[in-house]
Image (cartoon, rainbow, N blue to C red):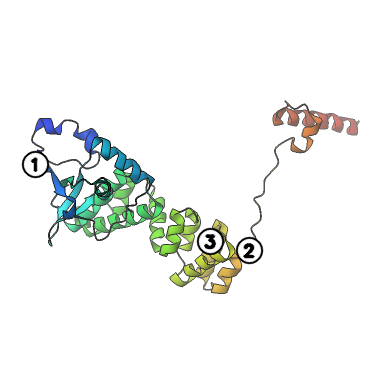
Amino acid sequence: MRKISSNNPIALAGFDDIFGGVMPQFGETVIEIALAELFPPDCHPFQVNNDAEMGRLVESIREFGVREPGLARKRAEGGYELLCGNRRKMACEIIGLPTLPVIVRDLDDDSAVVAMVDSNLQQRETILPSEKAWAYKMKMDALYHSSKRQDKHSHEIITEQTGESRNQIFRLLRLCELTETLLTKVDTRELAFNPAVELSYLSFVEQTAVVDCMDKYTVKPSLSQAVRLKKMKQAGTLTLEAIDTVLSEEKKPPHTTPTAGTHYRKFFPPDYSPKQIEEVIIALLKDWRKKQSA
């Protein structure tokens, strides 16, 4: 196995640029580990898909090699739990490479979760709403478990580290209360984020009824509809029939206010702007009012 010592100044050159969010700590080494010895975490909020993004990663590794090491910890049953680098591992499998450069770190369960979430949030090109929601939840739970070592609440730590507002973090966490089908619809943009947050307060059976109505009527619940369903739930009046009634409503087209001069455009030169049209109309109305009062 090839080892790069972090005590070697030549090996350290360029680590800030090359390794991104997974930096070797003092005394750590980057080790080439066989892919067969690397296993994903039992609970991993980030998807690993053979998609277009994976295709770009494959081509990058094929041309330049793996430029960022993964992060792993030893497993009691043997091998290593790959906390960060599962997409790079898949890319190596596609190319046919036998090993992945990895930093092996001694981490307890809570520290492993925090490291996994932080490194993936930093390094991933795109992050789905479901991935961010479950990542935040896992990190908050891990920070809560180790709260005796923290001076701040877990949500305050995440707020400072991510720049997300407290309200936005808790709204994201609400997505974890959605059924898998509804959460998938959020990821695929078949359901908008704000209505999804409101629907998260419904029970499993009620959310399933929402999905059925979405398919039956080919609709996306609007924010106003989702809010109504949530209020009915809180009032104890929500029934499956009520869900069907609300979601089968024909949506009115959004009201638009015509811009100034829209109805009178034909009376003005083509190059007149709405502001010019409005000024002419106001001047004519003022003149008309003077004549009326004379």
Front label number (1 vs 3): 1
Q: Quadrant of residue 284?
A: top right
Q: Position of residue 126 (x, y in %)?
A: 37, 45
Give the Cα distance between marks 2 and 1: 64 Å
Give the Cα distance between marks 3 and 2: 13 Å
Q: Which residue is mark 1?
A: 27
Q: Which residue is mark 2?
A: 249
Give the Cα distance between marks 1 and 3: 54 Å
Residue type pointed to by label 1:
Gly
Depicted 4 relative to depicted 148: above or below: above
Q: Position of residue 235 (x, y in %)?
A: 52, 71
Q: Secondary structure at mark 2?
A: loop
Q: Secondary structure at mark 1?
A: loop
Q: Position of residue 199 (x, y in %)?
A: 48, 62
- Closer to the camera, 1 or 237? 1
In the drawing, what numbered circle is on residue 96? Answer: none
Which residue: 27% across, 35% down? Answer: 63
Q: Which residue is mark 3?
A: 226
Could you tell which of marks 3 and 2 lies nearer the N-terminus? 3
Mark 3: few/some/many CA within 10 Å (<14, 14-19, 20+): many
Residue type pointed to by label 3:
Ala
Q: Say left or right for 284 vs 256.
A: right
> Which quadrant, please, contains the N terminus?
top left
Could you tell which of marks 2 and 1 lies nearer the N-terminus? 1
Which residue: 27% across, 50% down? Answer: 90
Q: Say left or right for 253 vs 145.
A: right
Q: Secondary structure at mark 3?
A: helix
- Closer to the camera, 20 or 68? 68
Could you tell which of marks 1 and 3 lies nearer the N-terminus? 1
